[in-house]
Image: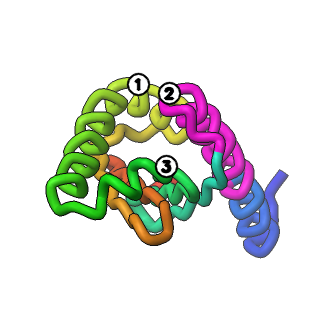
């Protein structure tokens, strides 16, 4: 059965929302199991980028450590090492959901807000 162009757009939109919902659930489960992050997570998709914002992901002791420049550098280094270690498993999860490969992952620390933001660069536009 042929759908009208308007119906095709609605169908594609519903599929994209379903895929994004699945992506959100799977990433939340992945991070909860790997880094014990049970805090609020938000996901945004922009073309070939997935942004994962983890609220309250920086503990009070990590926040205190960041008062010194060497402490901030240590927190960043540890976060980057964790990203490198998670990349192969995360690539498999993202490939299973999106059919795309994870090219790179990086993390930004926002100490004052006690947040971490992960940025995943994918091999193509997500949700195509």
For disc 3, the neighbor class at 10 Å (few under 14, some 14 to 19, many from 20) is few
Instruction: Judge by depth and name the residue closer to the eye, 8 or 93.
Output: 93
Q: Nearer the viewer, mark 1 or mark 3?
A: 3
Q: Mark 2 points at which residue?
A: 34
| CA distance separating discs 3 and 2 | 16 Å
The mark that comes first in sequence, 2 or 1, is 2
Residue drawn at 37 percent across, 51 percent down: 120
Instruction: Give percent across and percent down for residue 36.
Output: 56, 33
Q: Nearer the viewer, mark 3 or mark 2?
A: 3
Left or right position of 56 against 66:
right
The mark that comes first in sequence, 1 or 3, is 3
Number of the label disc, if any, that sits on residue 89 = 1
Residue drawn at 64 percent across, 49 percent down: 39
Q: Which residue lies furthest to the bottom in this view?
A: 6
Instruction: Judge by depth and name the residue closer to the eye, 27 or 4.
Output: 27
The local secondary structure at tag 2 comes to helix
Left or right position of 15 against 97:
right
Residue drawn at 54 percent across, 36 percent down: 31
Residue 110, placed above or below residue 126: below
The mark that comes first in sequence, 3 or 2, is 2
Range of magenta residues = 16-38
The local secondary structure at tag 3 comes to loop
Q: What kind of secondary structure does the magenta stretch mostly adopt?
A: helix
Q: Is residue 127 visible in this depiction of the protein?
A: no
For disc 2, the neighbor class at 10 Å (few under 14, some 14 to 19, many from 20) is few
Instruction: Give percent across and percent down for residue 121.
Output: 33, 53
Residue 14, placed above or below residue 19: below
Q: Which of marks 2 and 1 is in front?
A: 2
Q: Name the residue under label 3.
A: 59
Instruction: Give percent across and percent down for residue 116.
Output: 44, 57
Instruction: Give percent across and percent down for residue 85.
Output: 29, 28
């Amino acid at each position: 059965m042929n759908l009208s162009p308007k119906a095709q757009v609605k169908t594609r939109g519903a599929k994209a929302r379903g895929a994004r919902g699945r992506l959100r659930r799977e990433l939340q489960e992945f991070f909860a199991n790997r880094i014990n992050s049970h805090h609020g997570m938000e996901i945004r998709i922009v073309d070939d980028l997935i942004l994962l914002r983890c609220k309250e992901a920086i503990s009070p002791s990590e926040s205190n450590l960041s008062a010194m420049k060497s402490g901030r550098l240590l927190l960043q280094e540890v976060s980057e090492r964790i990203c490198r270690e998670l990349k192969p498993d995360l690539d498999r999860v993202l490939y299973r959901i999106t059919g795309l490969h994870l090219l790179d992952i990086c993390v930004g620390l926002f100490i004052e807000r006690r947040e971490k933001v992960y940025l995943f660069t994918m091999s193509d536009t997500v949700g195509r």
